[in-house]
Amino acid sequence: METDRDDYRGDEADRAGFYIDSVIDDHVKEAMRKAAEIPKGTAGECSSCGEWSMRLVDETCSPCRDKFARFYAP
């Protein structure tokens, strides 16, 4: 969070509430950032198995991506 958590003024309960809110906000922002990185995908025929899928990423369906993930991992 932009604000320094340790520099907040107020009584102990206020500081604890502010700290909890700021940590939750950090986690929500991180989840949103990760969700934005998920590739969009398109509908079509999988290049690996030939089955039609509603969502292909790099022309590959989810079961094939999971099955062959160990081959593509960096």
Image: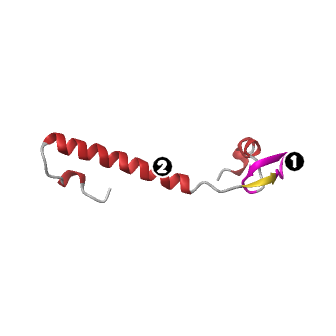
Callout 2–callout 1 Cβ contact below 8 Å: no
Q: Quadrant of the N terminus?
A: bottom left
Kindly indicate the quadrant of the structure image that contains residue 39: bottom right
Give the side of residue 28 with respect to residue 57, left or right.
left
Kindly indicate the quadrant of the structure image that contains residue 7: bottom left
Kindly indicate the quadrant of the structure image that contains residue 4: bottom left
Return the mark for residue 31: 2
- Amino acid carrying mark 2 in the image: Ala
12 over 25 or under it: above or below: above
58 over 19 or under it: above or below: below
For the magenta stretch, what is the residue range?
A: 45-58
Residue at x-position 70% and y-position 46%: 69
- Amino acid carrying mark 1 in the image: Gly
First of labels 2, 1 by sequence position: 2
Q: Secondary structure at mark 2?
A: helix
Which residue does the numbered mark 1 point to in the structure image?
50
Is residue 64 a member of the stretch shown in magenta? no
**Residue 72, how many percent across, how many down?**
71, 51
**Residue 32, how many percent across, how many down?**
49, 53
